[in-house]
Amino acid sequence: MIKTNNLQKVFRTDEVETWALNDVSIEVKEGEFVAIMGPSGCGKSTLLNILGLLDNPTGGEYYLNGKEVSKYTEAQRTSIRKGIIGFVFQSFNLIDELNVYENIELPLLYMGVPASERKRKVEEAMERMAIAHRSKHFPQQLSGGQQQRVAIARAVVSNPKMILADEPTGNLDSKNGKEVMSLLTDLNKEGTTIVMVTHSQHDAGYAGRIIRLFDGQVVTEVAL
């Protein structure tokens, strides 16, 4: 599903050139659960942003479902993101002014899904994530674990083929973190491809493979 060849990302200012990614070549097959690990500043989140088409690489190739997408325009990237990618972030990224139902519904609105179908999909996602009883609550009225459940429901409501998760348990206690990882594992067992950035060796243990980065380069790949 994912393949990169010599992927590079360089951030430049007037006087400084920083290589966030340096010739990164990885492959993630459809249905895999892959964890990306490494110290802070090693390029993990930069790589995830490129895989999620939130950013373009400076050099190299990125193949998604067999198509080379590294030079796509913003409109082309947006179209693909809406169609096949769901995102889960450490900071939840919920909109404070929208209640639980409205936050989960948002991707479907962007996709132009009819109202009756939106209602069905949102209700199904809320039930699955055990958050339906909070449908009219706003993010500030929820615990951290509940907010992350809403974020996952929003990520899966459009039935994406791939979920990209950036430190999904980073703001959660141990109990809620385990519940979130169990939810992601269940989604993977149903066929959803998951690529997760994490500092946690415990969370990485849920994956089938660990890719380790250091200074913007892949240093090891280990199957679990």
Image (spheres, rainbow, N blue to C red):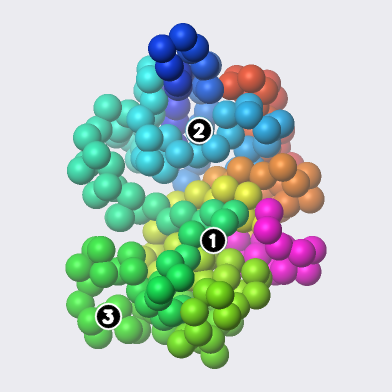
Tell me which secondary structure the magenta stretch mostly adopts. helix
Pointers 2 and 3 in contact (CB under 8 A)? no
Cα distance, mark 1 to mark 2? 19 Å
The residue to which callout 2 is attached is 47
Q: Which mark is residue 62?
A: none
- Pinpoint residue 198: horizontal percent, then vertical percent: 67, 44
| Residue at 60% in and 61% down | 184
| 84 w.r.t. 183: above or below | above
What's the residue type where badge 3 is placed?
A: Glu
Pointers 1 and 2 in contact (CB under 8 A)? no
Left or right: residue 202 compared with residue 98? right
Question: Which numbered disc, 1 or 3, marks the residue that appears first in the sequence?
Answer: 1
* Magenta-colored span: 170-184
Looking at this view, is 146 or 64 the one in front?
A: 146
| 24 w.r.t. 69: above or below | above
Q: Is residue 20 magenta?
A: no
In the displayed orientation, state which residue is furthest to the front.
14
Q: Residues within 10 Å of mark 3 (few under 14, many from 20)?
A: few
Question: Which numbered disc, 1 or 2, marks the residue that appears first in the sequence?
Answer: 2
- Pinpoint residue 29: horizontal percent, then vertical percent: 50, 41
What's the residue type where badge 1 is placed?
A: Phe
Q: Quadrant of residue 140?
A: bottom right
Cα distance, mark 2 to mark 3? 34 Å
| 157 w.r.t. 128: above or below | above
What's the residue type where badge 2 is placed?
A: Leu
The residue to which callout 3 is attached is 117
